[in-house]
Amino acid sequence: MSVPPPGGKGTTMVIGRVGKSWASAGASGAARHENAMTMRRNEEVMAAPRGGLRSGCDVTTIIRSTSEIAFRSTEFNQRRPRHSRGNTPMDNNIRRLGIIIPPGNVAVEREFPLHIPPGIVVNTNRLGRPDSNQTPESILAMNDTLAQTARDLAQAYPEVIAYVCTGGSFLEGPGNEAKPAKTIEQVTGIPGVSTSIAVVEALRVLGVRKVLLVGPYPHPIMKTEVAFLRHYGFEVPTYETFECMTSEANRKLTSEQIAQRVLDKRSLIEDCDGVFISCTNILVMDQIERLERELSKPVVSSNQATLWDVLRRMKVDSRGLRGGRLFEQHGVTAAAA
């Protein structure tokens, strides 16, 4: 079986695989062996865009020409990280920011690296927690492990350490929102950031006084969050919640679902200055610019506000990092960095 090569160039080949046996028509001897080895190396590359060759496949797969094989091998190598090709030696002379997160949080480590400039890495440590239930008792229990978690993370020598948990920093009651950051500073000597205080500062610099609150928490926690925002002078006419009872339920939410819930409340948002999307264990930063365009209002999320505060303290220019108005208009400018 054979297939003409694209454009009439290259050697027409048929590569077949049955179990672990390979055969080649149009090549012989050493050339046949080399073609077979080339095909094995390029197996996954060819499979991804063409849906063909895969490991363990028991059907005959046709590769059109040796010229295509060479092209796709080059394309694969160009997509690999430069350091893996040995062109750029690596060392640990790099700037670091530290984050402390709940054990079940899988959103921060997805979002932060996408919105920081090259030359900065994120080092993470996790708090202890008895379970993943979204109750005040479970969330606040994490704070008992904060001091040791911060001491351990300090051994990576980050410039700033952020306590990245909204509920854990407002559930202790009004006036205690900065407590996690102070604990970090006391036990490590490294500047600390608390998500709830970062949110307050973000809303203020954006001129938001009346805010629609959107979050994933059960109603009792959402009501406590409303009280926290009102304590700092914000008007919260209402809130929207996905009523997630566990951290696992948070993780099932997509950024598109969250954005759509916000957009469904346009009529309420028209009477507000902006939107606050709460919780560090939900993905939504990729939707902030879109929401701000469609609503013509500033939008703040827990992770966005926390990272913005960290970058400010590190004197890193946040413009161009796709963090919405907050990053573009209220971060450290290049001149001041």
Image (cartoon, rainbow, N blue to C red):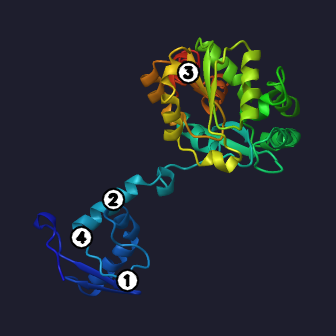
Q: Position of residue 208 (x, y in %)?
A: 60, 14
> Mark 1 — residue?
58
Q: Quadrant of the N terminus?
A: bottom left
Q: Nearer the viewer, residue 258 or 23?
A: 258
Amino acid type of the residue that numbered disc 4 sits on in the rendered structure: Thr
Res. 32 image quadrant:
bottom left
Judge by depth and name the residue closer to the eye, 297 or 41: 297
Looking at the rendered structure, the kind of residue marked 2 is: Thr
Going by the numbered disc 3, the residue's amino acid type is: Leu
Q: Which residue is mark 2?
A: 74
Q: Earlier in the sequence, mark 4 or mark 2?
A: 4
Instruction: Pick the quarter of the image with the C terminus.
Output: top right
190 left or right of 21 in image? right
Q: CA distance from mark 4 to mark 3?
A: 51 Å
- Crowding at label 2, few (<14), some or many (≥20) Cα neighbours within 10 Å? few
Give the labeled residue for mark 3.
Answer: 326
Instruction: Give the image location of residue 306, x and y in percent.
Output: 66, 29
**Which residue is at the far left?**
8
Q: Earlier in the sequence, mark 4 or mark 3?
A: 4
Please state which of the two labelled residues, at mark 2 or mark 1, is closer to the viewer.
1
